[in-house]
Amino acid sequence: MNSRIPTFAAFLTLALVMPALAQAGGTIPAGVKISVVTDQSVSSKTAKAGETVTGSVAHDVTVDGKVVIPKGAPVKLTVSSVQASGRLSTPAKLYLRLRTVTVGGKTYTIATSSAGRTLGGKGKRDAGFIGGGAAGGAVIGALAGGGKGAAIGAAAGAGAGTAGAAATGKKDIEYPAETRLAFTTRAAVTIN
């Protein structure tokens, strides 16, 4: 019975050491996808380029079956490109880039693609508001006062259409906390 104790102790030691060895690190090549969840919200209306946003790794990052970056590892993101929405023709945009990841108490700089979006241009929609207002004003002006009334009505309608486009067109991008973003590594990085 005493001979079983050293065997059991060796088995227990191996069972405790194996998970640590599985997360010992390695080299992540270029082209590997890293999914991240943000810890805080960020908006195109208030964010500044270079601003830091915190988060964590959403899924284990594995290379050749070995976990190199474990799920939950803290990350820092940087606002790489931002533009608040303009009233008529400036669409909002907000892009983030993964900057660092912390594994086993060590922080590693990582080069990745940007993740984010740009809202679609509003030019056609705004032109529709403005043109529709001008056409409507011209019709009303022509009925009320003939040719001169049509010109005045068109100008007034275009002004009203422009005001309508400006009032309805300002939309910013917001990523609330818990937003999931995917980044792709651009260069290899070794995690020890």
Image (cartoon, rainbow, N blue to C red):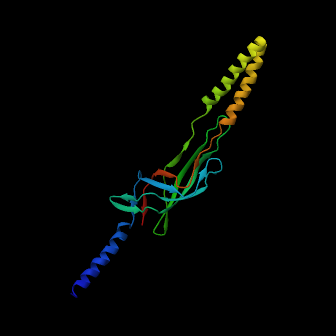
Q: Quadrant of the C terminus?
A: bottom left
Left or right of residue 78, residue 20 in this image = left
Q: In this view, does 179 lie above or below 169?
A: below
Quarter of image, res 5 = bottom left
Residue in the image at 75% along x and 22% along y: 155
Left or right of residue 187, residue 162 in this image = right
Residue in the image at 47% along x and 63% along y: 73
What x and y, as percent, mark residue 166? 69, 34
Quarter of image, res 139 = top right
What x and y, as percent, mark residue 14? 30, 75
Nearer-the-camera pick, 161 or 7: 161
Q: In this view, does 1 lie above or below 107?
A: below
What x and y, as percent, mark residue 105? 48, 69
Quarter of image, res 161 = top right
Q: Quadrant of the N terminus?
A: bottom left
Residue in the image at 61% along x and 30% along y: 125
Residue in the image at 24% along x and 81% along y: 7
What x and y, as percent, mark residue 190? 42, 62
Nearer-the-camera pick, 113 or 70: 70
Q: Spot the residue most to the bottom.
A: 2
Q: Is residue 149 above or below residue 182?
A: above
Task: Give the mark count.
Answer: 0
Left or right of residue 116, residue 137 in this image = right
